[in-house]
Image (spheres, rainbow, N blue to C red):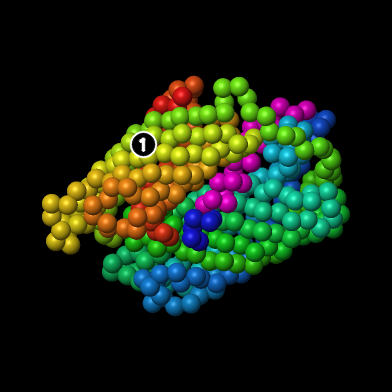
């Protein structure tokens, strides 16, 4: 559930931030719709040994530093879209994973979004989600680094959520103390890929280049637009994956699906759907285990939630297999996705499918929405 919780919270915050950024660009300069600040933060953490495969490397205590470039969105249009004043920005970070021979170091560049609660008070709480990429210095190698089952590529994805207690020293200086959950992996593109999970505590300070002022505004109610309350989508998707670490041959996965969603708020919709796929990676796994003649077709039904941001939609779904003769995995799985509408009908997107805490595959999809 660690990775699934992280992904869900990040999708929520990015939905707020992307929509706010989209609508904040037209605010007047006089409205001071963006407040820029720079920050520095230090983190100290422990390595969560969440799998027996990574237990042999032993306990470690990663630590790191990060520089932050922040824009606090305080315009009226931002407030109208989410009833909040989120902060967004870029983070450049370095982490020492406290195991130089196996895990090495990580250098990351990420984008984040951070809504503030009780923003007009001297002491306030904020919730941040960040996503981006990491350069990792010691990927798995069967000869030189056989113990690193955490990552097998020098480039990986970085996810983070953090809950912070902020204290505003004055109109330009803010100090924060936070609890963080950090995750690095490649999304199942190459094996091994158990990921690096490291919860942490941090302290940071940021300085604003202008006085921070937050205007009090009334909260507005959600009124669905005509013709935008319901959405139906037909999707086709394709992917591929390797079976074992060190292999180069990739095995095709493809399928199709249908979903129906209903708007329930400014940024929120509930959805339900069904999908069918053929998985040649599964077929190869069964063959290697001596199982022949078993179908590699699977079908499932899904329920979930979407964050709506204009042309973008971010989804999180729980699926249950209704046809799965192999029973190779648990009957319950998850999907997390990002779609973009090219017009009134066409859409494209990416989607990650996972069983428990392990990513199964990343797919690319295209379809028709109506």
Residue 360 location, x and y as percent? 35, 53
The quadrant in which residue 195 appears is bottom left
Residue 130 location, x and y as percent? 58, 51
Mark yes or no: residue 252 visible: no
Residue 147 location, x and y as percent? 35, 71
Residue 176 location, x and y as percent? 74, 60
Instruction: Pick the residue in front: 270 or 187.
Output: 270
Residue plotted at (59% across, 39% down): 268
The quadrant in which residue 226 appears is top right
Total numbered labels = 1
Residue plotted at (48% across, 77% down): 59
* In the image, residue 200 above or below residue 91: below
Q: Main secondary structure of the magenta part?
A: helix
Q: What is the span of residues highlighted in magenta in the rendered image?
A: 7-28
Mark 1 Cα-neighbour bin, 10 Å: few <14, some 14–19, many ≥20: some
Looking at the image, the residue that sits furthest to the front is 322
* In the image, residue 102 above or below residue 204: below
| Side of 18 where 368 appears, left or right | left
The quadrant in which residue 139 appears is bottom left
Q: Is residue 15 magenta?
A: yes
Looking at the image, the residue that sits furthest to the right is 170
Instruction: Pick the residue in front: 149 or 77.
Output: 77
Mark yes or no: residue 266 visible: yes
| Side of 359 where 245 appears, left or right | left
User: Which residue does the numbered mark 1 point to in the structure image?
Assistant: 257
Q: Is residue 8 magenta?
A: yes
| Side of 17 where 153 appears, left or right | left
Q: Secondary structure at mark 1?
A: strand
Residue plotted at (73% across, 42% down): 84
Residue plotted at (52% across, 52% down): 7
């Amino acid at each position: 559930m660690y990775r699934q919780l992280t992904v869900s919270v990040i999708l929520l915050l990015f939905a707020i931030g992307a929509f706010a950024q989209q609508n904040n660009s037209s605010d007047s300069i006089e409205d001071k719709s963006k407040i820029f600040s720079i920050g520095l933060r230090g983190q100290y953490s422990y390595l969560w040994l969440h799998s027996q495969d990574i237990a042999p490397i032993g306990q470690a205590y990663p630590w790191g530093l990060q520089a932050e470039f922040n824009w606090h969105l305080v315009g009226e249009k931002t407030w109208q879209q989410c009833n909040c004043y989120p902060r967004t920005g870029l983070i450049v970070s370095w982490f020492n994973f406290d195991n130089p021979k196996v895990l090495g170091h990580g250098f990351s560049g990420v984008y984040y979004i951070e809504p503030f609660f009780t923003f007009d008070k001297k002491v306030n709480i904020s919730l941040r989600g960040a996503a981006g990429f990491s350069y990792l210095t010691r990927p798995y190698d069967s000869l030189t680094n056989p113990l690193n089952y955490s990552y097998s590529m020098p480039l990986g994805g970085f996810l983070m959520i953090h809950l912070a207690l902020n204290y505003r020293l004055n109109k330009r200086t803010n100090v924060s103390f936070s609890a963080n959950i950090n995750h690095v992996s490649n999304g199942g593109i190459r094996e091994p890929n158990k990921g690096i999970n490291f919860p942490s505590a941090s302290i940071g300070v940021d300085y604003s280049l202008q006085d921070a002022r937050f205007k009090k505004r009334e909260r507005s109610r959600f009124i669905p637009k005509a013709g935008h309350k319901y959405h139906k989508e037909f999707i086709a998707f394709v992917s591929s994956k390797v079976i074992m670490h060190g292999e180069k041959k990739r095995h095709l996965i493809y399928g199709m699906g249908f979903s129906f969603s209903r708007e329930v708020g400014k940024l929120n919709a509930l959805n339900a759907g069904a999908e069918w796929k053929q998985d040649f990676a599964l077929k190869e796994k069964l063959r290697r285990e001596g199982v022949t003649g078993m179908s590699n077709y699977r079908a499932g039904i899904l329920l979930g939630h979407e964050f709506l941001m204009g042309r973008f939609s971010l989804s999180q779904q729980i699926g249950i297999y209704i046809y799965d003769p192999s029973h190779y995995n648990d009957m319950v799985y998850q999907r997390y996705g990002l779609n973009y509408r090219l017009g009134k009908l066409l859409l494209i997107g990416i989607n990650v499918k996972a069983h428990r805490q392990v990513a199964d595959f990343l797919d690319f999809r295209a379809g028709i929405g109506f």
